[in-house]
Image (cartoon, rainbow, N blue to C red):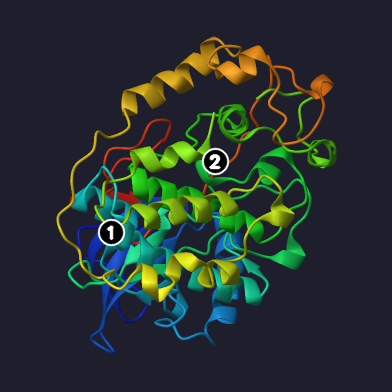
Amino acid sequence: MNITDHRVKLGSCHVVEDILGEGSFGIVAKCRNTETTNIEAVKVNKSEEGVLEVAMDEIAILKQLRRLNPDTSNIVQCNGFFFDKENICISFELLDLSLQDYVQEKNPRGLTTRELRPILHQLATALSHLHSSGIIHADLKPPNVMVVNRHEQPLKVKLIDFGVARLVSAVNQGDWMGTLHYSAPEMLLGVPFNESVDMWALGLLMVELATGCQLYPGKTEYDVLRFIFETQGQPCDDVLDRGCYTPESMKLNSLNDIEKYMVQDPGYEEDQKIFVSLIKSMLSLDAGRRITAQEVLEHRFFAPSLHQNSTDFSARSPVPPLSAASWEERVDNNHQNPTDGCCEKHQSGINKSGGGDASRVIIILNWGSRQRETMDGWHQAPPPPPSPGVNSEPPVSKSTTLHL
């Protein structure tokens, strides 16, 4: 099927008005429903066998979520699905723009603590609903969070894209899903995992919103794990021993440094410290100790005394952004010199903060990367230039003909 500009009708009543995005699954089109006159976002999946299977799994998850109020649960509303010849299409409410695009438009250096607070609360609310239903989103990242209306304050966001979501009960050891830069260490190591992988991704997403940079960029699993272990230490031996992808041995400066790269927000210094403390609890290397979505909602970061003026989006003082070039250089250097780039305390001794003994702390010299396909984000306009280490598909122009 070809979709050129807006001259195509999908199914019996959806007329394409624009192309919103393209991914490995297919495309997302802005459509007018001729029966209701509503404008909707329609995810048009490719007719390939593997994509069709993923689409049916997504529909099964979305059916479970239909009982939730899309506004109070902060989860995108699904209107239903239909077939257009051999292509399965899923209709959703049309939202404004992705959180990734919003930050690039608002301030690429990051958002203030007051702006971060409502976003974090809403995403924790969405995850709390998912997890109480036994569902793992498994691909939480800025492109998969949509802003409902960028001109309203406080900002309202919704979680989208359940293409790789799973029931906790259906997860098998060694399964991998989602996006490399937001993957929890237990998933990368092949350790049995649960819904706590979403909390890890939420922590990384919030760091990115706060600083304008990804915390753990990388081109391979090796890169990402190395960055994690350099910053947080290595997991305990029990975790390493249970990983079916754990190298024979691994070596792997502090999460406290996040605060210095956050946008200055005079009068909210204590809030920033509490925010960083909350992030650290999301990024626990021990999945069993990682904070839950419900515990996030009950955290003192959301105490009324801390955010009486949280909707006051005043001007803020600029701070030097993290150098994108330095992240790129860090990634490249790790490929060229895998023994370089460690912090001084790793060079002079062993960081035991993560547990384990000295015999386990050795550099990985050769560790191949498993080939994986990531379900791309959707519902979004063409993305901004990618962060270091991120491969991005080219934006879709209005004159493009897409072959599904």
Amino acid residing under circle 2: Leu
* Residue at 75% across, 64% down: 170
Q: Position of residue 140 (x, y in %)?
A: 50, 56
Circle 2 — which element?
Answer: helix
Q: Nearer the viewer, residue 257 or 236?
A: 257
Amino acid carrying mark 1 in the image: Leu
Q: Quadrant of residue 167?
A: bottom right
* Above or below, comparing residue 221 to residue 145 in the picture: above
Q: Is residue 96 visible?
A: yes
> Dividing the image into 4 quarters, which one contains the C terminus?
bottom left
Q: Quadrant of residue 150?
A: bottom left
- Is 50 on the left-hand or right-hand side of 269? right
Residue at position x 56%, y 43% in the image:
373
Is residue 110 positioned above or below 222 on the image?
Answer: below
Image location (x, y in percent) of residue 164: 58, 58
According to the picture, the residue beneath numbered tag 1 turns out to be 20
Question: Residue 180, which numbered label?
Answer: 2
Nearest the eye: 305 or 52: 305
Callout in the foreground (1, 2): 2
Q: Earlier in the sequence, mark 1 or mark 2?
A: 1
Give the residue furthest to the left: 315
Distance between the alpha carbons at the discs numbered 1 and 2 = 24 Å
Number of numbered discs on residues? 2
The crowd level at tag 2 (other Cα within 10 Å; few <14, some 14-19, many 20+) is many
Along the horizontal axis of the image, is 301 left or right of 223? left
**Foreground of the two, 278 or 180:** 278
